[in-house]
Image (cartoon, rainbow, N blue to C red):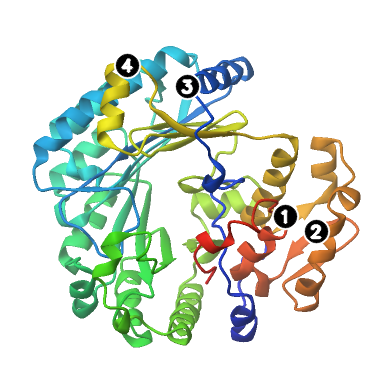
Amino acid sequence: MDQSIKFDTDLINRYDKAGPRYTSYPTALELHDGFTEGDYREHIAKSNAAGGPLSLYFHIPFCDTVCFYCACNKIVTKNRQHAEPYLDNLCQEIAMLGDLFDSSRVVNQLHWGGGTPTFLSAEQMRRLMTVTREHFLLKNDDSGEYSIEVDPRETHPETIRQLRELGFNRISLGLQDFDPDVQKAVNRIQTQEQTFRVLNDARAEGFRSTNVDLIYGLPLQTVESFSKTLNTVLEAQPDRFSIFNYAHMPARFKTQRQINEADLPSANDKLAILQMVGQRLTEAGYVYIGMDHFARPDDELAIAQREGKLYRNFQGYSTHSDCDLIGFGITSIGRVGNAYIQNVKELDAYDQLIKQHQLPVFKGFDLNDDDQVRRAVITQLICHFELTFATIENQFGIRFSDYFASELQGLTPMQADGLLKVSTDGIRVLSAGRLLIRNICMVFDRYLTQKQQQFSKVI
């Protein structure tokens, strides 16, 4: 499989408009409060009847300090005791959901995100994993994909050792940028020593995959400065890179108001940074997975993509498409059967519902038949950059050219621009179209028109 990308500045400028990141279809904006706890229980029952493995996501919202660019749901505090009542409720939610899901269903994937999961103490992390194992069937042979996001500024050798003992075998390190001026502008001071100590410790403890997060488009960044950061990280050869486009949306995210907009790089500078990133990573032997992600050719994501097994969910790219995803903790989103479920976003509401022995459901969405067809199309395109019509036709009993007649017509300009090729058998995204895969997927999005202004730019 050709996993290369082609950078065309003219095409990117013409297609660079707001659009979803498609961690789900329909997107989270379609979730509504008419979806109830009863609806969730019904979908759990259907899921149990269908069977299959599970994926668990735990949202740990606490952070010691605030990063000005952050758009995550977080609680900034230096008081570690604030996590204790939250952990009590989280363990109770685990117990409630554990009683509802078939206990024989194996957990193939598990992820702790946030916030900063390593905000928890060693004792708290041990307690959370112990309770999880009491109520769900986690693997003991290290074959599961159990991952965690860490902040190197507060992650120590004993932390890495304990995480490995708890069963984690994949780790993602937050970094963003090494440049001292950029770090000061976004309130995230982090040294190379802190970062690479964690990376090296993770490898020494036997973590099978290491990821480094970077962000381009932050204040005071230049091609030269970001190139230095990238080259420094490349020397350590992490298995994966997640290189995100900073979306400056201060009207939605209050912490971003502390960023001086005059210091943000121009659109042309951001494109130049992105072009440099693609070139340097390709030269270093990484392949473009899609949507900000690069991986070494022997990494599980790259292999899954070549084998047609890659999937995309609320945590990003995944190697397992057969798992129902259960979300735990405030603001977490799961996918059970043909429904999406989001938990309440506030600590008080979460605490109240858990104490009443109610599932903390805030919103949800039932996918209809059309949603399921379009989700399959978008998932194939965003994960594998190609789509065979017969696959969709056999799965859903439709004739693709009739069902998507207007959408295929909508792809005509993109085909003329060299982004993709439409044949009688399917759609193949070309190298020039891979950076613009969101635009291609948007053609198949039935909900997009009235919601487009709520998304960030695709590039």
Real-space CA distance between mark 2 and mark 4, rounded to the nearest whole angstrom? 48 Å
Q: Amino acid at mark 4?
A: Glu
At 16% from the left and 61% from the top, the residue drawn is 194
**Residue 129 can be seen, yes or no:** no
Q: Amino acid at mark 3?
A: Glu
Q: Which residue is mark 3?
A: 37
Q: Secondary structure at mark 2?
A: helix
Please tell me the numbered disc located at residue 134.
4
Residue 115 versus residue 255 in the image, above or below: above
Q: Which residue is mark 2?
A: 407
Residue 452 horizontal side relative to residue 215, left or right:
right
Real-space CA distance between mark 1 and mark 4, rounded to the nearest whole angstrom? 42 Å
At 91% from the left and 50% from the top, the residue drawn is 402
Q: Quadrant of residue 328?
A: top left
At 85% from the left and 42% from the top, the residue drawn is 393
Mark positioned earlier in the residue sequence (3 or 2): 3
User: Residue 21, how many percent across, how many down?
Assistant: 54, 57
User: Residue 358, how many percent across, how many down?
Assistant: 37, 18
Q: Are marks 2 and 1 in contact (CB under 8 Å)?
A: yes
Residue 278 versus residue 349 in the image, above or below: below
Q: Nearer the viewer, mark 4 or mark 3?
A: 3
